[in-house]
Image (cartoon, helix red, strand yellow):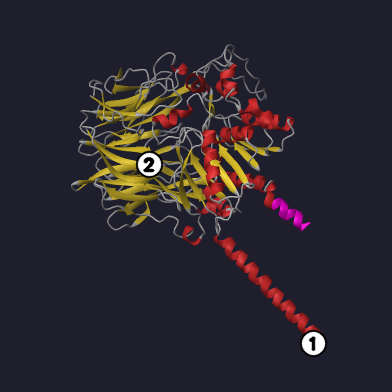
Amino acid sequence: MKLHQICAAAGLTAALAVTSAIAQEETAEDSKRFTAERVFDIEYATNPQISPDGKTIIYVRHSMDRMTDRDTGHLWIIDIESGAQRPLLGVGGSAGAPSWSPDGSRVLYTSTASGKPELKLVYMDTGLSYSLAQFTESPSGATWSPDGRNIAFSMFVPGDKPGFATPPKQPEGAKWADPVKVIDDLTFRFDGAGYLEDGADQVFVLPAEGGTPRQVTTGEADMGGQAWLDNDTLLVTGNLADDRDMDPIESEIYSVELSNLQITPLTSRDGPDFAATPAPDGRSIAFLGYDDELKSYQQNHLYVMGPDGSGVRELLSGFPGSPGQIEWAPDGKSLFMLFEDHGVLTLNELDLQGRLTQVVTGIGGTSIGRPYADGSFSVAKSGRREQIAYTAGFTDRPAEVATIRSDGKNGRILTELNSDVLPYLDMAPIEELKVASSHDGLEIEAWVALPPNFTADGSFPLILEIHGGPFSMYGPFFASEIQRYAAEGYVTVYVNPRGSTGYGEEFAQAIDQAYPGYDYDDLMSVVDELVARKYADPDRLFVTGGSGGGILTAWIVTKTDRFAAAASIKPVINWMTMALAGDIAQFVRRHWIREDPWSNPDAFLKLSPISYVDQVVTPTLVMVGEEDWRTPTWEAEQFYTALKMNDVDTALIRVPGSSHYIAGRPSRLIAKTDNIMGWFAKYDPAKIDEDSEGK
């Protein structure tokens, strides 16, 4: 071979070696990214239920089924002392809602293994299980009587269909059109349920050995929230008023005597009373509620009353938080209370004199798509102290099962559900950020997810991701959507602007009759801070959000052109149509706007992005589920059509079969995030420059 050929061959070999090394490096980097496919690898824990003796926990272990594209749950059992765990049941359909019998010998649970709704019971000594009854509707909220002999639950009972004519009989074999549907209820469809059947939820009682359920409440009003006051008396929650459709938040607590089905109201104020939780000895009832002031948001208050409804008193007057899940200590001398607390969930113990002690914070991690604070706990007596099981939240992985004593000691994480995947990936680190709002100096809390190889050099693109509600809160928790954005190179910031919960009632009510409003300034202040810190390129800013975050995204692009592109997901665009055709229309009209759209349309339109759509120049994607009845399709379609008419770059994505919760199936979560990023990439100045240089 001649010298020039040898040199050429050597050069080619070297070039191939470099190319191969680069390819291997890129493959290695890809293998460490949280890619779209990794969404199907995620597992997480919910509903940890500790046994009465405090030695065992049963929880729901969730995983993503690639073949059915479903989030499925199975019951697992943990021995607390050894940490050993195993499946409780054999393979089959999803199972959930575990509930220990009072003596710990049996566990009640729901199942879909047979392809239809079931309420089943498993004996802990033998592992044998059986279905308690034949159900045509799904039972929910099953709870044991104190003696373990009976089970109460709620279930839908069909009612009479309204009509004004009797159709003629069809000839045999004929194929006529479907009959007309007559509707006479104010709320006739609901998100996740579609068009509602005539009827109502009612409460039933069933022997623990199985048999025929006995219906113990009747009528046209929904009844539920069942709890046993004693072995012969149930507490239920509902609204029996004739005008209940006009007051959608109203509810009372009732007692039902099982001997004669006599129902007696225990509360009577104007405002919701719910979550009745009897003390172990049945002498007191703890419950949540508040006096209705016709606000868009009010915090829960915690009360106790006697078994006949007498002696009502508030336990935590002036407490800045809003109590959520409550449980009595086994000795009945105190209550455990979960509440939203500056982005996390905190568990406190409260004695009957109102003295409060923190047990543990950082509960959460069960919201997989977006970083909402969501979690639960259960309590048992173990020795001198109560033992508590709860869902522990983290920034880099979803919820695990944890346990701790009521004095806050001996805390342990008992599961590592994603130890086979997530430790080997470049998970985005999360930083906390607190910024003073440019509007009034109000402190605004946010969190920033940083992409791999991040440096604060002012070159990175930024996504502002806005939560829904708007009365909810984000926190420092794992979320697949946030991790996906960061994995693709975006600095991703998520914020709790005014209106968020967890920061006191005044903070949340700052947007009452003013939403959207100064929450815009809060969000822009956070973006300004990140640009000032050189976390983001000011020319590569993007904004997205869903539901309440969708309306804020739409509102933002009517007020500024600083974002290169926007994606408004399942938004409210027109409060008039929302107050007349959404599934919570009466709540919007009565509590949110507090006006009638036909007599004061300006009260609705002044807060509606549709009123200012002529000011939008930002390329804006709009997305909505085709079966979304919370913020129905026509909300997104109004904005899309108006943007088209104004010659603004836009696209409409409709998600087939999806309700308001688009991320309810793994493939939809992937489609949501990847289409948002695809839209942003189309208008990213850096990518546009790269494409131009490559031509």
The residue to which callout 2 is attached is 345
Q: Is 384 rendered above or below residue 29? A: above
Q: Is residue 424 magenta?
A: no
What residue type is disc 2 on? Leu
Q: Picture coordinates of residue 337 (x, y %)?
A: 31, 37
Picture quarter containing residue 220? top left
Name the secondary structure under disc 2.
Answer: strand
Give the camera-side residue of 60 and 267: 267
Picture quarter containing residue 676? top right
Q: How dense is the environment of label 1, judged by Cα within 10 Å: few (below 14), some, or many (20 and up)? A: few
Kindly report the secondary structure that dominates the magenta region of the rendered protein.
helix
Q: Picture coordinates of residue 627 (x, y %)?
A: 59, 32
Picture quarter containing residue 563? top right
User: In the visual, does 2 lie left or right of 449?
Assistant: right
The numbered disc on residue 3 is 1
What residue lies at 41% left-to-right and 42% top-to-bottom? Answer: 96
Check whether the beta carbons of the residues at disc 2 and disc 1 lie within 8 A of each other. no
Residue 131 shows up from this direction: no
- Magenta range is 687-695
Q: Is 289 rendered above or below residue 391? A: above
Name the secondary structure under disc 1.
Answer: helix
Q: How dense is the environment of label 2, judged by Cα within 10 Å: few (below 14), some, or many (20 and up)? A: many
